[in-house]
Image (cartoon, rainbow, N blue to C red):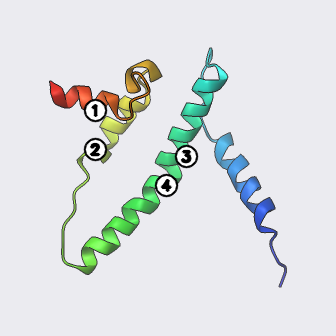
Amino acid sequence: AERVAAPEYIRARYREALAEVPRLDGEDAAQRRQREVAYLALSRWLPAMLERKDRMSMAVGLEVRVPFCDHRLVEYVWNLPWALKSVAGESKSLLRRALRG
């Protein structure tokens, strides 16, 4: 059996994932990086976490809900400008403002 060089494999998969990220005209390097990180979180990390949440909750007979994972909400927020999503470097600033009313 052929052995896979882990660092090379990881770099190749990472490059493939980044190639999927939608490119926007007029986006600077920082905005591009934010979009890449957000895309990877939504397309790679979130599905893994949701699957683990399902397995753990089912193992103990709980029903766990994730109301902010509604695809319509995710698609809407994905398309908002970064200036609305992050104010003064505060994470989840849009959500915090929405909950304040």
Q: Residue at x 58, y 25 (%)?
A: 31
Q: CA distance from mark 1 to mark 4?
A: 20 Å
Q: Amino acid at mark 3?
A: Leu
Q: Residue at x 44, y 57 (%)?
A: 47
What residue is disc 4 on? 45
Identify the element where label 1 is drawn: helix
Lower position in the chain sequence, tag 2 or tag 3 = 3
What residue is disc 3 on? 40
Q: Quadrant of residue 25?
A: top right
Disc 3 crowd, CA 10 A, few/some/many (<14, 14-19, 20+): some
Tag 3 near tag 4, CB within 8 Å = yes
Tag 2 near tag 4, CB within 8 Å = no
Q: Quadrant of residue 60?
A: bottom left
Lower position in the chain sequence, tag 2 or tag 1 = 2
Lower position in the chain sequence, tag 2 or tag 4 = 4
Q: Nearer the viewer, residue 28 or 75?
A: 28
Q: What is the number of the mark on residue 33?
A: none
Q: CA distance from mark 2 to mark 3?
A: 17 Å
Tag 2 near tag 3, CB within 8 Å = no
Lower position in the chain sequence, tag 1 or tag 4 = 4
Q: CA distance from mark 1 to mark 3?
A: 20 Å
The image shows residue 81, relative to residue 49, as above or below, that is: above
Q: Amino acid at mark 4?
A: Trp
